[in-house]
Amino acid sequence: MFGNLRGSKNRQLLTGVVIGVLFGFLLQKGGVTNYNVILNQLLLRDFTVIKIMFTAVVTGMIGIYLMKELGLIQLSPKPFYLKGIVLGGLIFGVGFALLGYCPGTAAGAIGTGSIHAFFGAIGMLIGTEIFSVVYPYIKNSLMKENYGSITIPELLDVRAWKIILFILIVFFFFLSFFKFV
Amino acid sequence: MSCFFLARWSPWLVGVGIGVLVWLGFLFSNRAIGCSTAYARTGGILESFIRGKRVKDREYFKKFSPIVDWEWMLVLGVGIGSFFSAILSGQFKMEIVPVIWSNTFGRSIILRLVAALLGGVFIGFGSRLAGGCTSGHGISGSSQLALSSWLAFILFFTGGIATAMFLFNFIGGV
């Protein structure tokens, strides 16, 4: 259906930048290109970041699984490897608190004039370069896949909609806790 | 149209909007929105200016070749979109030492930039080791109900909350 669009390299680069502009616009309007908003989330004084992310995931999962059932798209879940994800996730978290941005919000923050976000982005280039050098030495240990690209419904052997319903119920409690504010 | 000039939109509305963008990424491009590989590719592109084609021999760059791709354009777009949003609401401002940081660690520009750079190094390494960031794992991966992404999502925030508490409540509290 979208083969024409998906197949053209130049149209894909254009699609990428258009979706990116909309994404950046939303991140800034949501306040998460602001260092103080992210730090207040990590210090559990303000929950803007989690409100946005949880709502995005709930919205995203319903549409993604609907489109999958309609045969419009294929999923591309990332592979599961316990050690690397735990270690990498925690290292990411340390950096997240030191910098106050993640890769996406840092790009957005640079657009709003944040100089320290720019230094953070340079740091990310250094970090990914270091990783590209050590990758051959850890790919068979830390990054050895345990289950491949598995999803939670596949792991539990239940229909995806049951998991989606469960997450929606949790989201409903989350919403009522924050009273939609 | 006046909503475009507002400083903040409801986080619920923004969340729904980002979720819809995840749909569009899949539908139009067969891609999951993510940001961290764009940094890895940029590092490779910059390195190839110095070392030339030899960079492409590195195993990691065979997996993620150092080129401008869909995701690279997405990250560029994020900067542009955020710039326009900030200009429309009059929030564009040069910031070096943010308020929460200076309240605890003072106004030293050097200290803040070193911390930001170091934080970036951790993020760059950690995101590539975990296989994604708060966008690729946190939003797109979790939306697909990927096991890897839910684990990564939880650990990003576990590490982030613990470190922020240590920096600002423990060290900052002394």
Image (tube, coloured by chain):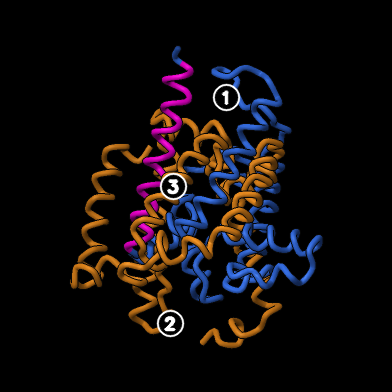
Chain colours: A orange, B blue
Is residue B1 at all visible to an observer of this figure? Answer: no
Please determine if labels 3 and 1 lie on a single subunit.
Answer: no
Quadrant position of the C terminus of chain A in the picture: top left
Give the secondary structure at mark 3.
helix
* Mark 3 or 1: the one toward you: 1
The residue labelled by disc 3 is A52
The residue labelled by disc 2 is A72
Give me the residue at 52% from left, 72% from top. B31
Q: Tell me: B86 left or right of A135.
A: right
The Cα–Cα distance between marks 1 and 2, rounded to whole angstroms, is: 46 Å
Other residues around mark 2 within 10 Å, as few (<14) / some (14–19) / many (≥20): some
User: Three-letter amino acid code at disc 3?
Assistant: Ile
Q: Chain letter for mark 1, please.
A: B
The Cα–Cα distance between marks 3 and 1, rounded to whole angstroms, is: 23 Å
Residue B58 in which image quadrant: bottom right
User: Three-letter amino acid code at disc 2?
Assistant: Leu
The Cα–Cα distance between marks 2 and 3, rounded to whole angstroms, is: 26 Å
Measuring from the top left, give residue A53's x and y in whole percent: 42, 50
The residue labelled by disc 1 is B101
Q: A133 or B18, which is in the foreground?
A: A133
Please determine whether, in this image, residue A46 is positioned above or below residue B75: above
Other residues around mark 1 within 10 Å, as few (<14) / some (14–19) / many (≥20): many
Is residue A102 at all visible to an observer of this figure? Answer: yes
Point out the tag, 2 or 3, that comes first from the N-terminus.
3
Residue A164 in which image quadrant: bottom left
